[in-house]
């Protein structure tokens, strides 16, 4: 398979088909695969400061994350997802590297699924609080400062 292409867009720059496909990937993994019925559409996708970042092959998204603009100039990375058939190929690491390039020197936070804390630590994140359970999955708050 050829190398997936990297895409970045604000909500206003997304066409309807692309937004549909990105939501489909998120729902397929977070709601269906992980059996977490929660409101995937939380209103933050459309905020002016939100950046959607994804890797695609032949137009189909293989991996995705979003960068939110939290108060105080803090960037929040979330909804990090890789399609089931594309896992194990380094796509999540590639996405995180690009996301952190876009974030630059701003402080950055995320809420990691606890079993992925080591992955995020490899990108400079440290644990900032106790583990908690959200939608039946252990999570841990993490941050990165430059």
Image (cartoon, rainbow, N blue to C red):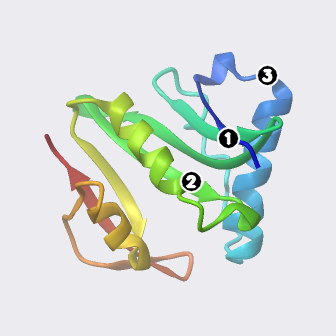
The mark that comes first in sequence, 2 or 3, is 3
Residue at the (64%, 66%) spot, across then down: 87
* Image point (36%, 54%), residue name: 110
Q: CA distance from mark 3 to mark 1?
A: 19 Å
User: Where is residue 69 drawn, in percent x and y?
Assistant: 38, 32
Residue 90 horizontal side relative to residue 28, left or right: left
How far, Cα to Cα, is label 1 from label 2? 9 Å
Report whether 143 appears left or right of 31.
Answer: left
Q: If the image is split into quadrants, where does the C terminus sit?
A: top left
| Residue 53 x, y percent position in the rendering | 56, 36
Categorize mark 3 by other alpha carbons within 10 Å: few (<14), some (14-19), many (20+): few
Find disc 1 in the rendering and name its residue: 4
Disc 3 secondary structure class? loop
- Residues marked 1 and 2 touching at CB (< 8 Å): yes
The CA distance from mark 2 to mark 3 is 23 Å
Q: Residue furthest top?
A: 13
Where disc 1 sits, the SS reads: loop
The image shows residue 46 at horizontal and vertical percentages of: 61, 28
Q: Position of residue 133 (x, y in %)?
A: 44, 80
The residue to which callout 3 is attached is 15
């Amino acid at each position: 398979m050829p190398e997936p292409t990297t895409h970045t867009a604000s909500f206003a720059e997304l066409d309807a088909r692309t937004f549909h496909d990105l939501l489909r990937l998120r729902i397929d993994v977070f709601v269906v695969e992980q059996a977490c019925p929660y409101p995937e559409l939380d209103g933050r996708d459309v905020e002016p400061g939100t950046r959607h970042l994804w890797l695609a092959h032949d137009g189909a998204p293989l991996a995705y994350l979003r960068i939110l603009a939290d108060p105080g100039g803090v960037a929040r990375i979330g909804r990090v997802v890789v399609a089931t058939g594309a896992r194990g190929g380094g796509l999540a690491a590639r996405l995180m590297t690009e996301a952190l390039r876009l974030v630059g020197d701003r402080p950055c936070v995320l809420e990691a699924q606890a079993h992925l804390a080591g992955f995020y630590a490899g990108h400079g994140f440290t644990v900032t609080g106790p583990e908690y359970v959200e939608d039946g999955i252990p999570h841990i708050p993490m941050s990165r400062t430059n």
